[in-house]
Image (cartoon, rainbow, N blue to C red):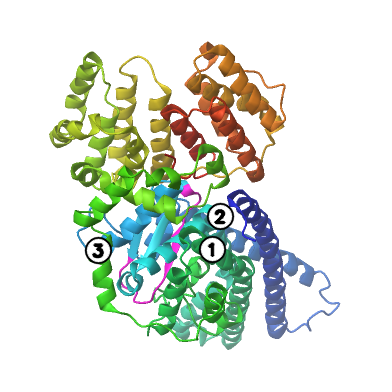
Amino acid sequence: MAMNFFESQAHARSNTFKLVWLFALAVISLIILTDLLVLTVLGFSSNIPYGSSAAPNTDWTIFVVVSLGVGSVVMLGSLYKTMALSSGGKAVAEELNGQLIPQNTDDLKLRRVLNVVEEMAIASGTPPPPVYLLANEQGINAFAAGFTPLDAIIGITQGAVDHLSRDQLQGVIAHEFSHIFNGDMRLNIRLMGILSGIEIIGMAGYYLMRSMNSSVGSYRSSKKDGSQLFILAIGLMVIGFAGAFFAGLIKSAVSRQREFLADASAVQFTRNPDGIAGALKRIGGLEFGSNIENARAAEVSHAFFAQGVTGFMQALSATHPPLEERILKIDPHWDGKYESFDANIETQSDASTDQAGGQSRAGIAQKVAAGVLGTMMMDVSNAIEEIGKTNPETIDYARSLIAELPSAVKAAAHEPYGASALIYSLLLDRGQEVRFRQFEYLNKHVTQGVYTLIHQLLTDTDGMDIKYRLPVVDITIPSLKQLSLEQYHEFKGNLTALIEMDAKIEMLEWSLQKILFSHLDAHFLKPEKMSMQMFDIGQLRKETGLLLSVLAHSGHEEQAETDAAFSAASQTLGLNELQLWPKNEINLSKLELSLHKLAKLKPLLKPQLLKACAVCVLHDQKVTVVEVELLRAFADVLGCPMPLLA
């Protein structure tokens, strides 16, 4: 039985502790092997027999020095690699020579990839992650990388873009979203950092051998020293081989079962086993398979959709189950035949599915008008159960929302400056006096092009139905991530100034701001390190009470209704002693601080808190826009992608 989002997060955390123990065992093994090598080399070159009583303490001194040296080198190597990857998923993509696919690309195949990612993301309640193309890779493969869903990216090879149908591509993307939601990405980056340290011993031997070859003349005068260094270099390279073997075993121990889980989740997300099974079959039928040619592919091998690196070491400790085994688990009646590429199917898919216009858009609009979408959407209480998941109905609903957006809004959302203008226009006050002052400010602080575009977008944004608000914000985020750091700081400052212009910050404004900044800060600023300290709800009573108080006050006008909603939510948590905060004592700084602490709840306690939030919202059997956006903002901060709500 597949684990839910929170169980997967807890399992990933336990896997982290497993990784630490495996790393410790590998380092101890490398230290022992290196000690034996050094002592053997010294025994070979010394006139005093190894271990003789003439130097009883020498061996132990060497043993301690070498052990400390090897341990330090491994730790420093791991630390250096971890720091190099500290910027999150984009560092992994760039290491593999990935190129960011522009959100406004005119390439139909790349547009299709972005559309699939966009639909899957919005359906699951998270902004679309940036997508990087490995343009020189002809094999079919993909990966997800990052520390959290907030800074996640998806990488995809040119082979996958060229050789997969839309359904197959959707299966692969769903597989990668499973890794994003299940906490696998952080584990994968930690693996890259840790294993880099383990493999550094072999690199030392390799560079020592190279230095000997380039300086061979200097060793002729001392044959003994030359032999000694040669044996040391060969020995270190052999130990490096052992280190690579240990690294492969650790990758295999941590990642193989996660691939089965991600395959099962992809089928659950799309309810189309032929999609991901077809992608795996095409890998088997393609000359390039799933191979990644980049020299650094081995470091990321555990993060790929399919086995990206081949060779003797990979066969001994494969990071992925065999292709045949994965296909049979999804399609038990598979006849053993792989699929070849059909260009005609691809052309039809591009024309009929990815261009949301004409009959396609009209058909979707007709579905909406007929009220079909009402039965498709889950209510708030069910949404908590579906965190970290999606399904074909919500994907179709997300696709319909995107298709219904005015063309000017979609065009703006897919371009950095246009996305900025779109967000500004969404936050303009409805009152003419405040809006006039906001325009005066914008005229001084944004470029003339952005200022003009804001005015052009107002016709669409002022009359936009509230149901489009969160999807529009979501699809702007990948484009906003293409701003420079300086431009982002300007955008953030302008947004804050617009919100504060009316001398009051409404919860609707705060929730939009929080959703934007939580995702963009994770991209532009260094991701915050996840604290190893995790809390129980009982330790955060004050913070929990504040969170529920905000929802109770936001959704209910009468004090009796507010009290009843808060009481029902408290009972859900089994914390009857929680105190309702008076409305005049709640401020945003206290709310921000409380959310920061609540984000450190143990994974399996987060659904309890969100269920209590849902009980608070649903107590009066009415759900307001403010409540929906607050729930989404709270879930974002807690690291829980909440599916799209009607």
The x, y position of residue 386, in whole percent, is 54, 48
Above or below for 259 versus 528: below
The x, y position of residue 426, in whole percent, is 28, 31
The x, y position of residue 73, in whole percent, is 59, 63
Residue position for label 1: 262
Q: Which residues are magenta?
A: 134-149
The x, y position of residue 278, in whole percent, is 43, 75
Residue in front for this viewpoint, 418 or 332:
332
Residue in front for this viewpoint, 296 or 249:
249
Tags 1 and 2 in contact by the CB under 8 Å rule? yes
Q: Is residue 287 left or right of residue 570?
A: left
Give the residue furthest to the front. Answer: 370
Q: Please identify the quarter of the rendering in which residue 275 is found.
A: bottom left
Secondary structure of the residue carrying numbered label 2: loop
Secondary structure of the residue carrying numbered label 1: helix
Q: Amino acid at mark 1?
A: Ala
Circle nearer the N terminus (2, 3): 2
CA–CA distance between discs 1 and 2?
A: 8 Å
Residue position for label 3: 352
Instruction: Give me the disc on residue 182.
Output: 2
Residue in front for this viewpoint, 433 or 4:
4
**At x 28% / y 74%, what residue is drawn?**
345
CA–CA distance between discs 2 and 3?
A: 33 Å
Circle nearer the N terminus (3, 1): 1
Secondary structure of the residue carrying numbered label 3: helix
